[in-house]
Amino acid sequence: MIGVFTVGKPSELVQGTLDVLILRTLALGPKHGWGIAKRIEQVSREVLQVQQGSLYPALHRLEQQGWIAARWGETDGGRRAKLYRLTRAGRAQLEREQQQWERLSAAIDLVLQKA
Protein backbone atom coordinates (compact mmCIF):
# COMPACT_ATOMS: atom_id res chain seq x y z
CA MET A 1 0.00 0.00 0.00
CA ILE A 2 1.20 3.49 -0.84
CA GLY A 3 1.33 5.79 2.16
CA VAL A 4 -1.18 8.44 3.13
CA PHE A 5 -0.29 11.95 2.02
CA THR A 6 -1.09 14.62 4.55
CA VAL A 7 -1.81 17.96 2.95
CA GLY A 8 -0.34 20.34 5.43
CA LYS A 9 3.03 21.73 4.41
CA PRO A 10 2.89 25.38 3.35
CA SER A 11 4.79 24.96 0.08
CA GLU A 12 3.46 26.68 -3.03
CA LEU A 13 2.74 23.38 -4.80
CA VAL A 14 0.80 21.97 -1.87
CA GLN A 15 -1.08 25.26 -1.40
CA GLY A 16 -2.08 25.37 -5.07
CA THR A 17 -3.04 21.72 -5.02
CA LEU A 18 -5.15 22.14 -1.90
CA ASP A 19 -6.87 25.17 -3.44
CA VAL A 20 -7.89 23.26 -6.56
CA LEU A 21 -9.06 20.27 -4.48
CA ILE A 22 -11.26 22.57 -2.42
CA LEU A 23 -12.65 24.33 -5.49
CA ARG A 24 -13.38 21.00 -7.17
CA THR A 25 -15.11 19.68 -4.05
CA LEU A 26 -17.28 22.79 -3.78
CA ALA A 27 -18.23 22.52 -7.46
CA LEU A 28 -20.47 19.66 -6.31
CA GLY A 29 -22.34 21.91 -3.88
CA PRO A 30 -21.94 23.79 -0.58
CA LYS A 31 -20.08 22.07 2.24
CA HIS A 32 -18.70 22.90 5.66
CA GLY A 33 -14.98 22.57 6.36
CA TRP A 34 -15.09 19.08 7.84
CA GLY A 35 -17.27 17.94 4.92
CA ILE A 36 -14.73 19.28 2.43
CA ALA A 37 -11.88 17.44 4.15
CA LYS A 38 -13.86 14.18 4.35
CA ARG A 39 -14.91 14.39 0.69
CA ILE A 40 -11.28 14.84 -0.45
CA GLU A 41 -10.28 11.90 1.74
CA GLN A 42 -13.08 9.68 0.39
CA VAL A 43 -12.59 10.53 -3.28
CA SER A 44 -8.82 9.97 -2.99
CA ARG A 45 -9.55 6.55 -1.47
CA GLU A 46 -8.08 7.70 1.85
CA VAL A 47 -4.72 8.65 0.27
CA LEU A 48 -5.10 12.41 0.86
CA GLN A 49 -5.85 13.73 4.33
CA VAL A 50 -6.33 17.47 4.73
CA GLN A 51 -5.29 18.84 8.10
CA GLN A 52 -7.43 21.56 9.73
CA GLY A 53 -4.34 23.76 10.08
CA SER A 54 -4.09 23.85 6.28
CA LEU A 55 -7.78 23.67 5.37
CA TYR A 56 -9.09 26.70 7.21
CA PRO A 57 -6.35 29.12 6.11
CA ALA A 58 -6.96 27.91 2.53
CA LEU A 59 -10.71 28.50 2.87
CA HIS A 60 -10.04 31.99 4.23
CA ARG A 61 -7.62 32.73 1.37
CA LEU A 62 -10.08 31.47 -1.28
CA GLU A 63 -12.83 33.56 0.28
CA GLN A 64 -10.64 36.68 0.21
CA GLN A 65 -9.92 36.04 -3.49
CA GLY A 66 -13.65 35.89 -4.17
CA TRP A 67 -13.56 32.29 -5.38
CA ILE A 68 -15.74 30.97 -2.57
CA ALA A 69 -18.37 32.53 -0.33
CA ALA A 70 -19.40 31.49 3.18
CA ARG A 71 -22.53 31.74 5.27
CA TRP A 72 -23.63 30.25 8.54
CA GLY A 73 -26.11 27.39 8.29
CA GLU A 74 -26.97 23.96 9.62
CA THR A 75 -25.29 20.69 8.72
CA ASP A 76 -27.28 17.56 7.92
CA GLY A 77 -26.82 16.62 11.57
CA GLY A 78 -28.36 19.87 12.78
CA ARG A 79 -25.12 21.51 13.91
CA ARG A 80 -24.45 25.17 13.17
CA ALA A 81 -21.49 25.48 10.78
CA LYS A 82 -20.00 27.79 8.21
CA LEU A 83 -20.99 26.54 4.76
CA TYR A 84 -18.79 27.33 1.79
CA ARG A 85 -19.92 27.55 -1.83
CA LEU A 86 -18.17 28.18 -5.12
CA THR A 87 -18.74 31.60 -6.71
CA ARG A 88 -18.90 32.35 -10.44
CA ALA A 89 -15.31 33.60 -10.24
CA GLY A 90 -14.41 30.38 -8.43
CA ARG A 91 -15.86 28.27 -11.23
CA ALA A 92 -13.76 30.18 -13.76
CA GLN A 93 -10.67 29.74 -11.57
CA LEU A 94 -11.37 26.02 -11.19
CA GLU A 95 -11.50 25.67 -14.98
CA ARG A 96 -8.14 27.45 -15.33
CA GLU A 97 -6.60 25.38 -12.54
CA GLN A 98 -7.84 22.10 -14.01
CA GLN A 99 -6.39 22.97 -17.42
CA GLN A 100 -3.04 23.87 -15.85
CA TRP A 101 -3.06 20.70 -13.74
CA GLU A 102 -3.78 18.51 -16.77
CA ARG A 103 -0.95 20.16 -18.69
CA LEU A 104 1.49 19.83 -15.79
CA SER A 105 0.60 16.24 -14.98
CA ALA A 106 0.86 15.23 -18.66
CA ALA A 107 4.33 16.80 -18.84
CA ILE A 108 5.45 15.03 -15.64
CA ASP A 109 4.05 11.76 -16.97
CA LEU A 110 6.05 12.20 -20.17
CA VAL A 111 9.26 12.74 -18.23
CA LEU A 112 8.61 9.72 -15.99
CA GLN A 113 7.91 7.48 -18.98
CA LYS A 114 10.88 8.70 -21.06
CA ALA A 115 13.49 9.14 -18.36
Image: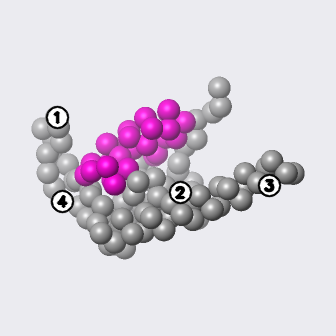
N-term mark: 2 or 4: 2
Whole-Å distance between the Cαs marked 3 and 2?
Answer: 20 Å
Q: Position of residue 65 (x, y in %)?
A: 37, 73
Question: For the residues marked 1 and 2, what is the alpha-carbon distance in whole angstroms?
Answer: 29 Å
Q: Position of residue 30 (x, y in %)?
A: 25, 52
The magenta segment is 25-51
Q: Earlier in the sequence, mark 4 or mark 3?
A: 4
Q: Residues within 10 Å of mark 1 (few under 14, many from 20)?
A: few
- Label 4–label 3 contact, CB within 8 A: no
| Residue under label 4 | 71
- Quarter of the image with the N terminus in it: top right
Amino acid type assigned to the residue bearing label 2 in the image: Thr
Q: Give the mark toward the camera: 4 or 3.
A: 3
Q: Mark 1 sits on what residue?
A: 77
Instruction: Provide residue 90's location: percent of width, then percent of height.
Output: 36, 67
Q: Which mark is residue 111?
A: 3
**Residue with the mark numbered 2:** 17
Residue at the spot x=38%, y=50% of the render? 25
Q: Is residue 63 visible?
A: no
